[in-house]
Image (cartoon, rainbow, N blue to C red):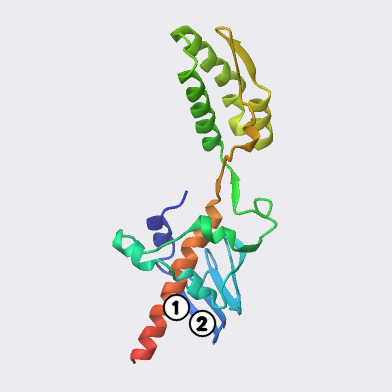
Amino acid sequence: MITEDQFLKEVDQHVMEVIRGDGLYRHVRFRRPDTMCMHFDLITWPGYLCYCGDMGTYVFCRLEDMFEFFRTDRDYAHRRGRKLFINPGYWSEKLQAVDGNRNSASAKEFSAEKFEQTVKDWLAGWMRHRGLDKEGRRELRQLVEDSVLACAYDGDVRAFDAAMNFSKEVGGQRFEFTDFWEVDCTEYTHRFMWCCYALAWGIQQYDESKTLQEAA
């Protein structure tokens, strides 16, 4: 997953162009000169903000001025030594539309790594309270490894099917991934995380530019 430092490195040569700045009606573009690589536009109208660019298209709705919505908690970030504050969980709740050509129109995607860790935690928690001997624990771990974890990188459908269909008796006790389909094994996509950083950074650049204009 992209970090703040990685994002800032990728936009360190971006230049801001205000295409329209009419109150709540804005169109601001950020890109490196002479290329559209990793460019993005921020477009606002009352109650909405549209982010579009190389990382996809996302439309948010919450406040009359959506720049104000994404300005929140800057001081919180600065107190922790960060330059940007993002809140992917809360911000994703305000999404109205996502580029349908990517990730099935979602800001999240299946994570094989998260699936693996969840399976391991589930198994460890079950064994902790069942009093299995060392041999029983070893046997069950190997069975889960071969039948479930082996499918982690085969996509979410096959991975969850493997977990839900798993049922083994070890040491006179049956282990199953009961109701495992309720478990969230997704994480925010690289593109959406990049978008979040771009929103925080782009609006910050816009605000700093306005401050300089007012001081001139």
Q: How far apart, in angstroms, are the residues tagged by discs 2 and 1?
A: 9 Å
Residue at position x 56%, y 72% in the image: 41
Furthest residue in direction bottom, as rendered: 216
Question: Which class describes the residues within 10 Å of circle 1: few (<14), some (14-19), or many (20+)?
Answer: some
Q: Is residue 93 left or right of residue 201?
A: right
Which amino acid, mark 2? Val
Q: Nearer the viewer, mark 2 or mark 1?
A: 1
Marks 1 and 2: in contact by CB < 8 Å?
yes
User: Do we see residue 145 in this rendering?
Assistant: yes
Q: Which image quarter: residue 77?
A: bottom left
Q: Quadrant of residue 119?
A: top right
Residue identifier under label 1: 206
On the image, the x and y values in percent for residue 209 come to 40, 82
Dot 2: what SS? strand
Of the numbered discs 2 and 1, the one sitting upstream in the chain is: 2
Give whichever of 34, 114 is nearer the camera: 114
Label 2 packing within 10 angstroms: few (<14), some (14-19), many (20+): few
Residue 193 visible at all: no
SS at badge 1: helix
Give how far across and how far down residue 203 sits, in percent. Answer: 46, 73
Q: Which residue is label 2 attached to?
A: 18
Residue placed at 60% from the left, 46% from the top?
109
64 and 163: which one is in front?
64
Which part of the image, by quadrant, shows the C terminus? Answer: bottom left
